[in-house]
Image (spheres, helix red, strand yellow):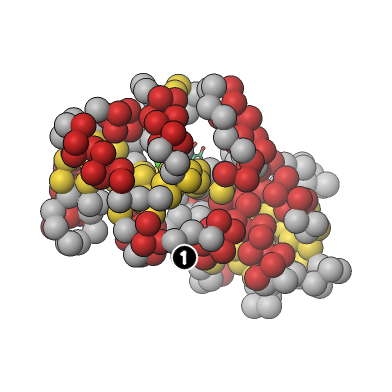
Amino acid sequence: RGAPRKLTGKKQELDAFIDQFEYFLFDCDGVLWQGNVLLPKVVETLEMLRNKGKKLIFVTNNSSKSREAYSKKFADFGIPVEVEEVFGSSYSTAIAISRVYKIPKDKRVFVIGEQGIEHELAAEGISYFGGSAPLPFPEDDVAEHVGPDPSVWAVVTGLDRKISYAKFAIAGGYLQDPNVHFFATNIDSTFPTHGKLLPGAGTCAAPLTLMTGRTPIAFGKPSMAMMDSIESKYSLDKSKACMVGDRLNTDIQFGLRAGLKGTLAVLTGVSTEADILKAGEVGEGPDVYLDCLGDLLG
Ligand code: PLP
Ligand code: CA
């Protein structure tokens, strides 16, 4: 791979770049918006791509929202996006559990996570417990409630901003049975908000790894399980697809591992220009980068 190249604002160069692709896979936070703030010219850029007939898929590692909640977030920003155009890590996890691993009908999963996971599991008809519900006993009594449970088929972790020692203890109890699957929506180390880095979804799985020696199978970027699902759902032709992202170790890795035709990084999120150039030296950088997505308009 060549060194990552910064696209100039020349219309001709931008058009030549865009014309190579039929599909654009967009990361969301750090590319389209930062938390609740829409980035400049995003509406116009997406509209320009749609007008050119490009197929857009929005691929987010944010496990805290369902696809439906995401589609609503887009609508609130004035961006028309169908539920079916959103592919989130909670959805990716739910369809893997039901359609690839084929959870038996009489089994259930224990959730460390929030409503995004719960909604997507429910939509796939998967029985679950835990999640946003309070534990049905005083946390101080947790030792009495830890144990194996033959109805539990998997532990699923995602970002849980109400995580507690008791939840870890219960999950750890199930995972001591090697037949119980250990799944994670994503294992991001951090998630950026308010210009700061907070603990990401990976930190809600890591204590269980430390405790049991087991590592989860993760279904968010850069997992190829997510790419495989996207490929089959959208009949994606990888030789005509570009991944757009702000984070090297999730988004750009995702595009590179999958062998997508192109990768585009933007500097409005986690990775900096210095990070991008450094990654380029070891063949792990994007093909091209821009200060912000809106610069694609020229
Ligand atoms: N995980 C959580 C909980 C988040 O809130 C976010 C961003 O909002 C992310 C992950 C990263 O999402 P994305 O893949 O869209 O950058
Ligand atoms: Ca991002």
Seen from this angle, which residue lies furthest right? 106
Q: Does the numbered disc 1 mark a residue whose Cβ is under 8 Å from ligand 1?
A: no
Please state, as top left, top right, bottom left or bottom right, where the C terminus lies in the image. top left
Q: Which one is in front, 289 or 93?
A: 289
Residue at 17% x, 31% y is 10
Question: Callout 1 environment at 10 Å: few (<14), some (14 to 19), or many (20+)?
Answer: some
- Residues 157 and 146: in front is 157
Identified at 36% across, 62% down, the residue is: 239
Q: In which quadrant will I find the N terminus?
A: bottom left
Residue 98, image quadrant = bottom right
Residue drawn 77% across the image and 42% down it: 133
Above-or-below relation of 111 to 103: above
Q: Is residue 253 visible?
A: no
Q: Tally the numbered discs.
A: 1
Above or below 298: residue 112: below
Position of residue 192 in the picture relative to residue 82 (left or right): left
Q: With 194 as the anchor, is 145 left or right in this view? A: right
Q: Position of residue 208 (x, y in %)?
A: 56, 61
| Left or right for 37, reference 263 | right
Residue under pointer 1: 224
x and y percentages locating residue 188 in the rendered image: 44, 50
Q: Residue at x 45, y 55 (%)?
A: 221
Picture coordinates of residue 76 (x, y %)? 58, 22
Residue 174 versus residue 294 in the image, above or below: below
Q: Visible in this render: residue 11?
A: yes
Quadrant location of residue 39?
Answer: top left
Please tell me whether mark 1 sits on a helix, a strand or a loop: helix
Q: Residue 181: x percent and y percent?
A: 65, 70
Q: For the residue marked with disc 1, what is the amino acid? A: Met
